[in-house]
Image (spheres, rainbow, N blue to C red):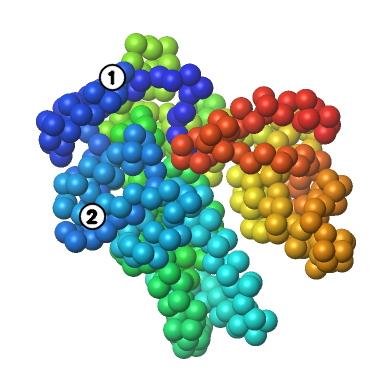
Amino acid sequence: MGLSPTMPRGAAMSKAGVDSLSVLCLKWLESLFETKRFGTPNINNFWDVVPAVTGDRFLSMLPPWHAYERACEYFIFTHGIEQVYTTVSNLKEDLRHYQPHYLISVPLVYETLYSGIHKQISASSAAQKFLALLLIKISMVYMEHKRVYEGKYLTKRLKQQPLLVAILDCFLARIIAGILLPLHLLAKKLVYSKIHSVIGISKAGISGGGSLPSHVDRFFEVIGIKVQNGYGLTESSPVVCARKPSCNVLGSIGPPLKFTEIKVVDAETDDLLPPGHRGIVKVRGPQVMKGYYKNPRATEQALDKSGWLNTGDIGWIAPHHSVGRSRHCGGLIVLEGRAKDTIVLSTGENVEPTEIEEAAMRSSLVQQIMVIGQDQRRLGALIVPNKEEILAAAKRKSIVDADASELSQEKISSLLREELQTWTSKCLFQIGPILVIDEPLTIDNGLLTPTMKIRRDRVMARYADQIASLY
């Protein structure tokens, strides 16, 4: 997430205080980015998030020119840590071969690992599949109650629980977790240890550059692989927040880094909002750019006179509670989407598409999805189907013969509609018409960013005629 203008704009940043980078690194940086002057990337503060030591191994698959990857590289090289580069096609094999301590990547990679693990479980015998899924569900309940008694349960509520209620709540959660602990330990031995042996990531996975789906976040917590979600922008060099090993609260992007301030303001009035209230996230700190290179108009829109950067992201700050299930969540930042991605229906209702997309992506039949509906009466969606899974599902339901090799568009659409109804039923808004597209959204065809986020404006432009026909 972050400010990503349609036309390239150099973010001019102050060089003062870049004591964590050598002069050689700065010259190299400037030679690669002639249109930018970088500021203080807070690399010295990364160790609070990633306490790596000499001999640790990092695996990364991001482009080396990307700000997220570049900052990680500087941190890695200044601490004598081994760095291994991989690609999408080699990721599975390289995880198995190199057994990295840390994985640096974007949410889509963790989603891919999640899907791959579930696919392997589904391919097991009926008994093994049943046992594995049952143990995962038990572990989910165990971790849910563990978060409660550890005080790491996010809430927007300003008023904290009364002391007696908080004590009873945590006591009950500890009892339930204690009852489920033996089964969770059994799951670790029978199921999760096998996953660890395949993918490594023995210390942590670092996720940034996009929204980490909650079901993926919970799953990796359950199987014992710590995923630390972070947040930043190119305009902030790039890291702003990140979850720490000691307080890895699911659903959040952690606290701000040292010397970094964050506030949430009303989108229309710019008034400061109290904790628990949703608004536009603004950032101020030494890593924030001085402005866009030779673009004062864009600079004025993004930066105010006090140095606050308008991120364009929607979020809230967790309230401070001294007791209860949320006692260790105060001050953590939670993001809920991009302000510019909000869909305004003709009814006047505002819809955040991310929640619906994340829910739909839990279906194995959906490879990619983009929710649409701006100025329409109802939502729609563009879907890239997982053809292999859809064909298998059609055969299981006897929609086609066992030896069939393809499906008609009508049958594909019908199966996808059923899946959407199943997986998005708990969402406030439901998807109406859908457009099935055969071509995946990729970096090469310009429909994904380098960090694998959908370029919504480009997708809308490419399929404008088909989208118009939906309504």
Identify residue for label 1.
Answer: 34
Left or right of 386: which side holds 26? left
The answer to whether residue 396 is above or below residue 407 is below
Q: Is any atom of residue 185 visible in this view?
A: yes
Q: Is any atom of residue 417 visible in this view?
A: no
Within the image, what quadrant is residue 214 found in? bottom right
Question: Which residue type does callout 1 highlight?
Answer: Glu
Q: Nearer the viewer, residue 387 or 371?
A: 387
In the image, which disc is placed on residue 18? none
Q: Nearer the viewer, residue 195 or 334?
A: 195
The answer to whether residue 418 is above or below residue 237 is below
Q: Nearer the viewer, residue 26 or 122?
A: 122
Residue at left 80%, top 53%? 406
Residue at left 61%, top 82%? 128
* Image x and y of residue 157, in percent: 51, 55
Residue at left 76%, top 58%? 391
SS for tag 1? loop
Left or right of 112: which side holds 14? left
How many discs mark residues in the rendered view?
A: 2
Identify residue for label 2.
Answer: 82
Q: Nearer the viewer, residue 457 or 66?
A: 66
